[in-house]
Amino acid sequence: RLVGLQAMVPPCVERVISLERGSLCWWVPWKWDEQMRVQQKLRPPDTVQWQRQWDTMRVFRELVDDTDRNQTNMLISESWHLWMVDFSRAFRKSPTPRKLEQLRRCPAGLLARLRSLDPDEVRRAVGRHLQRAELAAVFKRRDAIVAHFERRIAEVGVDNVLF
């Protein structure tokens, strides 16, 4: 929510059910996961929009250090909307993005939100779910991602980086 990706990450809330702590997540109406799409050799009708969704996903993956973004946790709706689910291996303590070289393009709005991301606001939003070291790592990765896109903009121009 803080970086504006509500349309790609379904909301989840913590709940205790039958004395078990867990999460309830909004059900995504999906038709394929990425593995199925690849196996069936399906092509999106709008490749530009599809690539933009992938570019956005990659930025978020690096921000939260999601080490398990795989073909089965990338869900695709019938209208070719990409959803990211399962962040059970995210928010690691590594301060460095793992695949910065894969970040080629970024939505202008996402980059603006990354630049203005406030540590206190993030801390309030995540509550006790992230430790101090995990939060610090998010902001170090954020700084590296922003610097990366600023370099790319200087090298190849804003129109070739932001959409």
Image (tube, grey):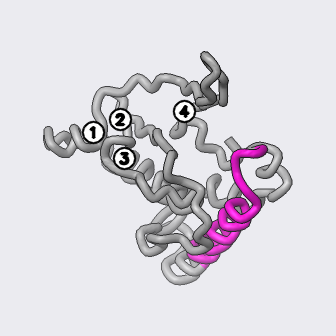
Q: Residue at x 31, y 47 (%)?
A: 71
Question: Gap between marks 4 and 2, in whole Å?
Answer: 13 Å
Name the residue type under label 3: Trp
Instruction: Of the two numbered discs 1 and 3 on the same chain, state the one appearing first in sequence.
Output: 1
Q: Which mark is residue 50?
A: 3
Name the residue type under label 1: Pro
Under circle 1, the secondary element is: loop
Q: Residue furthest top?
A: 18
Above or below 155: residue 44: above
Residue 118, given in percent of the width and then of the height, sits at 81, 57
Q: Quadrant of the rendered structure where residue 91 is? A: bottom right
Instruction: Of the two numbered discs 3 and 4 on the same chain, state the one appearing first in sequence.
Output: 4
Residue 54, given in percent of the width and then of the height, sits at 41, 52
Q: Residue at x 48, y 71 (%)?
A: 98
Residue 162, given in percent of the width and then of the height, sits at 54, 62
Under circle 2, the secondary element is: strand
Instruction: Of the two numbered discs 2 and 3 on the same chain, state the one appearing first in sequence.
Output: 3
Question: Gap between marks 2 and 3, in whole Å?
Answer: 10 Å
- Circle 3 crowding by C-alpha within 10 Å: few under 14, some 14–19, many from 20: some
Q: Which mark is residue 10?
A: 4
Q: Which mark is residue 45?
A: 1
Instruction: Judge depth for marks 3 and 4 and give the one in front.
Output: 4
Q: Which mark is residue 159?
A: none
Above or below 19: residue 65: below
Quadrant assignment for the N terminus: top right
Between 83 and 53, the residue placed more toward the observer is 83
For label 2, the residue is 76
Q: Which residues are magenta?
A: 127-150
